[in-house]
Amino acid sequence: MTIDTAISELSAFLGDRLSRSKSDLDAHGASETWYAPAPPDAVAYPESTEEVARILAICTAHGCPVVAFGAGTSLEGQTSAVAGGVTLDFARMNKVLAIHQGDMEAVVQPGLTREELNRELRDTGLFFSVDPGANASLGGMAATRASGTTALRYGTIRENILALEVVLADGRVIRTGSGAKKSAAGYDLTGLFLGSEGTLGIITELTVKLRGQPEAVSAGVCAFGAMSDAVETVVAVIQMGIPMARMEFVDADTVRAVNAYSGTDLPEQPHLFVEFHGSDASAAEDAARFGELAAEVGASDVRTATRTEDRTALWTARHHAYWACLGLKPGATAVVTDVCVPISRLAEAVEETRADIAASHIPGPILGHVGDGNFHAILLVEAGNEADLAEARRLASRMAERALRMGGTITGEHGIGLGKLGYMEAEHGEAWAVMGEIKRTLDPAGILNPGKLVRQN
Amino acid sequence: MTIDTAISELSAFLGDRLSRSKSDLDAHGASETWYAPAPPDAVAYPESTEEVARILAICTAHGCPVVAFGAGTSLEGQTSAVAGGVTLDFARMNKVLAIHQGDMEAVVQPGLTREELNRELRDTGLFFSVDPGANASLGGMAATRASGTTALRYGTIRENILALEVVLADGRVIRTGSGAKKSAAGYDLTGLFLGSEGTLGIITELTVKLRGQPEAVSAGVCAFGAMSDAVETVVAVIQMGIPMARMEFVDADTVRAVNAYSGTDLPEQPHLFVEFHGSDASAAEDAARFGELAAEVGASDVRTATRTEDRTALWTARHHAYWACLGLKPGATAVVTDVCVPISRLAEAVEETRADIAASHIPGPILGHVGDGNFHAILLVEAGNEADLAEARRLASRMAERALRMGGTITGEHGIGLGKLGYMEAEHGEAWAVMGEIKRTLDPAGILNPGKLVRQN
Ligand SMILES: Cc1cc2nc3c(=O)[nH]c(=O)nc-3n(C[C@H](O)[C@H](O)[C@H](O)COP(=O)(O)OP(=O)(O)OC[C@H]3O[C@@H](n4cnc5c(N)ncnc54)[C@H](O)[C@@H]3O)c2cc1C
Ligand SMILES: Cc1cc2nc3c(=O)[nH]c(=O)nc-3n(C[C@H](O)[C@H](O)[C@H](O)COP(=O)(O)OP(=O)(O)OC[C@H]3O[C@@H](n4cnc5c(N)ncnc54)[C@H](O)[C@@H]3O)c2cc1C
């Protein structure tokens, strides 16, 4: 068999860095969410770009599927090895290669996680801003076009990657971008690989932008009587141009889950979690303007935190919200939705989603990076319960359709993987076909993460 | 002949919107800079996406080159019809189709210029931020990945375009992106068309981001004793994270030219032109911090302007700098360079460039968007003087090589066109070949702006 031939060639040069142990295969075939396990035939742990190039050349020659794997935290089944083959785990390519402090840039390997990077940057006065909550790898974040809580101020991964080294399916190694802050030198190949979910090439090095630690950071939470009040506040804040660093919405169900999971005692009402970065004066001014707007719609229980520990506690609670929500239904797994709509439609989109879920038999706390118009319902389904799953998928479908009807997108940040394939045609029409044409140009043998993102033929 | 067949088919349905008048052909074959005229065989003035689609289908069928044309202000010969064919002038597709005030977005046709757009936005409290100085068209700015004086704060065109409508070479019409602020739904086709200089598809509609007019704007100019002091100030400002809206460098030669052209009386020394946007308090705070840094290196003659008229006068002088420089050498045309380097190498890059030009026989004022690490030398050559031109090209080459050696790029914002083709391999290596593969996938007949950006075979 072709996969077997490839694997024996790989094993000849990778030695024990090619694993076929059941536990390894299972760990790499599992998913954070509801997707059925789909283990690969082998897991490779490359240590260099050259090894990755050699692996890809072999796999292309034998038609063996290759699935890149960072931290495995993606939510749409992106790392499932649905056609078998080899998973490339970047655990051993996780170094910071250079920190260019004066240029506010770092060069890193793809397996490095964002928390590891920020740990290394601790004493530099700089930080890497993209924050998807989960401790994702830089390669995985780049490959899913991740964003998270700070995109409002610092942009998504798209605004924070300057250059990539990429190995193409045939083993060629290319560099995209440069150390310059901007360039008009031809097609934006960096941008093309961002969000390509391992289907166009394998990222082996990234040059990332760093940000200066703000002089002052202040954070706050406030409770609202109604979800619509919270969302109205968000819309007003955006339209007034208050430079928020973070602005996260959680609904009452999410608060209940977070209180139980993290031992907090927030009132069980919709909340906004906010953060301001700037000079002492500007952060205070921004916080005051935000406070006024929130007060106008009757926000109460405003708690602020300026000490690092208090802020960390606050954001840890928010970052654990996903696991907290899972705890609402013991033994549950989740269908996680991820729509993003124009800000003027946000209130309507959230309200209609809320009503839909309220009328259904499954729980679905809502939370999100609402400053971008992006929110999630965590639809809780009992593992193996087909009725739950069908209902969750129906709700997810309605959310996706609603987002498209409102001029938005089916995924603000989680990507396509397996879960959103069914809506790609609706979102993109003929442009989806163009994605397929590009895919076939760069990966004619179709070995790179088959079954994901583009139309399957 | 195939071009003739295409033109007669086009003329049958475009009527007098297909022009073959000599003056029209000449106007569209000319260039802002030193490139030899290369007129097309005809100029079409489409009025709708459908017409563009029909034109492209006809041109693909007959192998007739198609060159898109916005305002014709590009500097690298991008609109030269080097292989003849039809130029598509978007003068009649220049409408604002919608302004979504709440979402801070506008939908526009490609022929609209940025000044026209900002005029239409005057009463909304919003503005379109990308400002290349010239009154470029939105389609041209998108197609060249333009930036300009405000990229420092608001990003380049890449950060300010949400969605495109594009007609492909075969006449298919696709939509990329959506009205949502971010998306992870598959390959970033919007990004792929930005900077593609009309070689991958023709942009027929753009959804652009708008920004809120800042509450307060203050501007200033200050003179420095030495160029290195000005550049050092820039580097310090960036590293301290002072949120500048604009930070432009002009050297003493440029000041001399500007004084002569615009009637200003700036001392003939290197200057920085700066601008701050924010609340009254934050703009004042930022200006004060900038002032302190500049004073530390001995900046003098700091003039500030807060009234709109004064600021406009200041920026008009800056925006006219290109034409002012041309005035330094009567009858001259220019080879305009456009390198961008990591900020830590900026001082060195500018100094070495200055020394190179000083040792040459042609004038070359230096100016640029130094906050991004991006600067230009306007190398003045007498029209038709081969020795001048050879010298300018030698200097330009050295600048490009220097930028690459320093980890930068051969073009920060002007693009490739004809002028930078020769450095593409040096900048991108195998990635340039990948650009060619993508080009051939989307335009197999090679009709879209042939001779530009990708390797010619
Ligand atoms: C609790 C929780 C909260 C989350 N919150 C957010 C959020 O706020 N925002 C957000 O954007 N996401 C969020 N996510 C999703 C997830 O964290 C992101 O999708 C993340 O970017 C995935 O990174 P990873 O390293 O885990 O990638 P993986 O899951 O390992 O891989 C993801 C995809 O990238 C590909 N890939 C990985 N490495 C490479 C490489 N080197 N080259 C090419 N392709 C590669 C894989 O093949 C796969 O297709 C959340 C997840 C969880 C569990
Ligand atoms: C004085 C002066 C100062 C300048 N300063 C700057 C600056 O600061 N920053 C900067 O970035 N640039 C600058 N430029 C260059 C120029 O203004 C930009 O390149 C601008 O983006 C070109 O826009 P345009 O409408 O004139 O495009 P054109 O010159 O008409 O076309 C440029 C390219 O885009 C393609 N194109 C045009 N319209 C479309 C379309 N609808 N679909 C597909 N392709 C299309 C053309 O085929 C061509 O390849 C300056 C130019 C001058 C003369």
Image: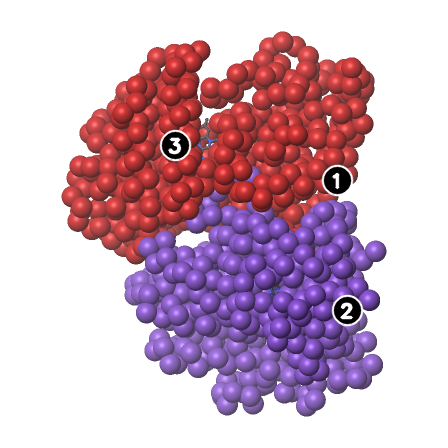
Chain colours: A purple, B red
**Cα gap from disc 2 to disc 1, whole angstroms:** 43 Å
The quadrant of the image that shows the N terminus of chain B is top right
Q: Which amino acid type corresponds to the residue marked 2 in the rendered image?
A: Asp
Q: Quadrant of residue A147?
A: bottom right
The answer for which chain carries disc 3 is B
Q: Nearer the viewer, mark 3 or mark 2?
A: 2
Mark 1 lies on residue = B173
Mark 3 lies on residue = B398
Which residue appears at 34% of the width and 58% of the height?
A101
Label 1 crowd bin: few (<14), some (14–19), many (20+), radius 10 Å:
many
The residue tagged with tag 1: helix, strand or loop? strand
Mark 2 lies on residue = A4
> x, y percentage for residue A345?
64, 59
Which residue appears at 79% of the width and 78% of the height?
A389
Q: Is residue B292 left or right of residue B93?
A: left
Q: Quadrant of residue B57?
A: top right
**Cα gap from disc 3 to disc 2, whole angstroms:** 52 Å
Q: Are marks 3 and 1 on the same chain?
A: yes
Instruction: Work out whether A125 lies above or below A220.
Output: above
> x, y percentage for residue A19?
66, 76
